[in-house]
Image (cartoon, coloured by chain):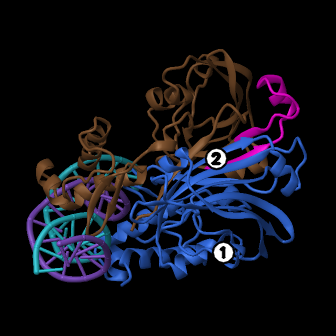
Chain colours: A blue, B brown, C purple, D cyan
Amino acid sequence: MSKKYEDIAEELRRRIDQGIYQEGQMLPQQIALAEEFDVSRMTLKKAMDILAMEGLLFRKRGVGTFVHKSTLWNTSSYKATEYRGLTVQLPDKKVESEIISFDIQFPSEELQKILLLDSNEAVYHIIRLRIVDKKPYILEDTYYVVDIVKNLTEEIIYESIYEYIRSDLELKVGGAYRKISADTPSDVDIKHLDASENTPVLEVEQVVYLANGTPFEYSKSRSRFDMRSYTITDIIPH
Amino acid sequence: MSKKYEDIAEELRRRIDQGIYQEGQMLPQQIALAEEFDVSRMTLKKAMDILAMEGLLFRKRGVGTFVHKSTLWNTSSYKATEYRGLTVQLPDKKVESEIISFDIQFPSEELQKILLLDSNEAVYHIIRLRIVDKKPYILEDTYYVVDIVKNLTEEIIYESIYEYIRSDLELKVGGAYRKISADTPSDVDIKHLDASENTPVLEVEQVVYLANGTPFEYSKSRSRFDMRSYTITDIIPH
DNA sequence: GAGTGGTCTAGACCACGGT
DNA sequence: CCGTGGTCTAGACCACTCA
């Protein structure tokens, strides 16, 4: 069962992409669109809310709904709120992995707090280098809760862990907390990211939750400053 | 006229802060809360949507609504979606400013595209060092559209520009696009941020929009890697 | 005043999780 | 099966902008 407002959001997104609704141009009024899609106005508005939060539309009360101009933000930078794997973020590129370490262990006290675990509930610990178009791209240091992300194998890690979580385990990701910071390179960074002692590093520390609120991943991902950046769209509803 | 769902969100936030609804605990069902606040269930749900997006609550269909546990994310890091000034972000600290340059100019071609200006519509260009507790904290390189942020003076810049925009000009901020990246320090960074040649720098590039969708600010803010980081809460609705 | 989007309702029905 | 939250409706009324 698909949700009407998601379908409509999808269709409107398509029309903007294809230029049927052009940059800066006004869209048909909500009532007309509601009639076209044969839904109530509230449902149509909910679809528009999604696009407004994504930054594609903005609305002005008493005036109308417009397509936002893009410019800066369609560059080679990644949405900070992207939770799917690199394979999805870089569909045109060749993404490979090098497994630097893969083991199973009991969580430290700090990790127990973060992932809401007892000391006897094991975690996988994976250090993995992602290689894009033959160049070292990002170094991931990740912990997964074993009870949730069951039966990880080297084969899965070599491909896409998120694909496995979604398709095989049929788990739904519900969201994440992220912290973005800069850092000096560690020895490990220098070794694997093709960095020198003075190359700044961009780090994303994150806890990822299932749709039911259970945390299942804690990770730190580091990349060279000149390889990656993150974008955030922040629309305040009014 | 205040909005009911904002008032209710505020009240629920207060109850979570005060521990009336405790971490991990289930809240009263939506229908009961809707009756308590004397609103429809849709309105109550909208209030909860806000708190869920903030990451305070999560809901599980068929089960109930729970208070999210916090841990990691209440540290000394700043919400990436905070658009108000430093004065608000650091209420306990002494925030001062040093004006490095302040002039008015015509926008470059690139800036015209970003801020949707003609070549004859002037912008203020401000380079300002923010000093927190006597330490250099962040170096801001900002352009404001003169037609919108009228009559800027050195006095205003020395204090809080956002306070001026909100209180005196009575403009409402509607959102922003941000890009976070790391960089090597520039000469200006080294000079003003108490950085050496090898100190990584964290940069936030942003375009800020009024509530009506008009862009009015383009800026790059840089800080030393060890002075600042940004957090993002990302909840996928389901 | 005419036309836009924003809020709110009262109620129906659906999807999901646990018993 | 029951109880939870999620979706959707049809319509009312409000707030804002612009002619």
Amino acid found under the numbered disc labelled 1:
Ser
Q: Nearer the viewer, residue B102 or A200?
A: A200
Amino acid found under the numbered disc labelled 2:
Ile
Residue ID at (50%, 62%): A66
Classify A108 as above or below B186: below
Mark seen at residue A175: none
Q: Nearer the viewer, residue B98 or A227?
A: A227
Categorize mark 2 by other alpha carbons within 10 Å: few (<14), some (14-19), many (20+). Answer: many
Q: Nearer the viewer, mark 1 or mark 2?
A: 1
**D8 left or right of B117?**
left
Residue ID at (60%, 77%): A163
Mark toward the start of the polypeptide (1 vs 2):
1
Q: Which residue is mark 2?
A: A180
The quadrant holding residue A50 is: bottom left
Q: Which residue is mark 1?
A: A160
Point out residue B13 in the picture as x, y percentages from the top left corner: 31, 42
The quadrant holding residue B48 is: bottom left
Q: Chain of mark 1?
A: A
